[in-house]
Image (cartoon, rainbow, N blue to C red):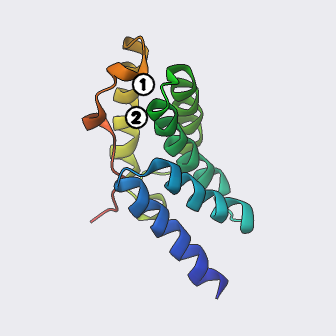
Amino acid sequence: MDDDKKKELFFSGLKTFNGGNYFDAHEIWEELWSEYYLKDREFIQGLIQLAVCFVHLQNGNINGARSLLNKSTKKLNKFPHDHRNINLKKLKNIMIELNIELEAINNAAEFDWSNCPRILLNE
């Protein structure tokens, strides 16, 4: 039962994140991270931090967004490109571009929301 719940939380977080509801994605993954001691809990924490990066942008907090993106990048870079069957190589490349954009803008209102990544599974 626990394995089913863990899988449900993980994929529910992905779907929610990809739907642009970053706060709820963070909450779902936070439950997975805090309720279950996972071997890859640092990976889940990296996803949480990525979601919170966008929550900060939605709230106008550019510095918080930059900080969380950097923390997320450091965590996700520790994992192979196919971890949990996610196309992490593509996600990591998008995160590099996001970092460049966040450093180039002066406030969150300038962020181009079309640059938000989707977290895709490998085909």
Of 7 and 80, which appears nearest the observer?
7
Q: Give the quadrant of the N terminus.
A: bottom right
Q: Is residue 112 above or below residue 29?
A: above
Q: Which residue is mark 2?
A: 95
Q: Amino acid at mark 1?
A: Asn
Element assignment for label 1:
helix
Where residue 49 appears, as percent x and y from the top left, is 57, 42
Which residue is painted at 66% across and 57% down in the image? 41
Where residue 71 appears, as percent x and y from the top left, is 60, 33
Where residue 91 appears, as percent x and y from the top left, is 37, 44
Tell me, yes or no, if residue 116 can be seen here. Answer: yes
Lateral position of residue 116 relative to residue 25, left or right? left
Of 59 and 39, which appears nearest the observer?
59
Circle 1 Cα neighbour tier, 10 Å, few/some/many (<14 / 14–19 / ≥20)? some
Q: Is residue 110 above or below residue 117?
A: above
Element assignment for label 2:
helix
Q: Which mark is residue 99?
A: 1
Label 2–label 1 contact, CB within 8 A: yes
Q: Give the quadrant of the C terminus.
A: bottom left
Lateral position of residue 30 relative to residue 103, left or right? right
Asked where in the image residue 95 lies, by quadrant, the reply is top left
Q: Residue furthest front?
A: 59
Tell me, yes or no, if residue 79 can be seen here. Answer: no
